[in-house]
Amino acid sequence: MYRVRLFAVRHARRFEWLYGRFEAFMAACDPLFSRLGYARVERPVAFVERLTKGFLFDCRMCGQCALSSTGMSCPMNCPKQLRNGPCGGVRAGGYCEVIPEMRCVWTLAWEGAARMRNGGGIHEVAPPVDRSLEGTSSWLRASREKAAARREAREAGRTALARAYPGARASEPATAPLADEPAR
Ligand code: SF4
């Protein structure tokens, strides 16, 4: 719905906050999703995602959500489906050249991003859409990636500690006082 879409852009900052919490919740569900099998939860989660985001953002289920870096304005609603915009055809007042009665998705994106923290990352160049992911849940993908990154960071921390330990033992001062052995 077009009006709800405009509402989402006007409240981009709140949606950004909400999305952050939701993403953390989904990432916390990773052990559960892993146990059930990501392939098994894909369909029900994608169904809920389609309904929710379809209502709020006119989501087209591209599978690689960019909302957090496009001011909560879905770039797939651009008739040219540009992932970096706007194009050179924006009309006076920020309207689309293909659908003249619609505000350009990318003018809205810049407005929404200005309301978000650090400009919503809109200045970063986005990669082209991977059509093979169409129809899949980007919620699941994002939370899975986040959980995997956390696991990797934890693992790297442990490895670094394990590597540092022998070095620390070797450079320990030989004169370091030893603790008294406890009485038997
Ligand atoms: S960027 Fe993709 S997943 Fe995100 S709202 Fe638009 S179509 Fe849906």
Image: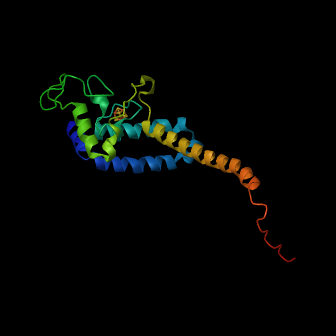
Report the residue at 25% width, 28% height from top.
86
In the image, residue 117 sits, relative to residue 84, either above or below, namely: below
Report the residue at 82% width, 75% height from top.
182
In the image, residue 92 sits, relative to residue 33, either above or below, namely: above
Report the residue at 21% width, 36% height from top.
2
Q: Estimate the x, y position of residue 91 in percent, counting from the top left.
A: 14, 26
Q: Estimate the x, y position of residue 20 in percent, counting from the top left.
A: 40, 48
Labels in figure, total = 0
Report the residue at 23% width, 40% height from top.
111
In this orientation, which residue lies closer to the viewer: 136 or 128? 128
Instruction: Pick out the residue farthest to the bottom.
Output: 183
Q: Which colour style is shown?
A: rainbow
Q: Is residue 128 left or right of residue 165?
A: left
Q: Is residue 59 left or right of residue 99?
A: right
Q: Is residue 95 visible?
A: yes
Name the quadrant where ligand 1 sits. top left
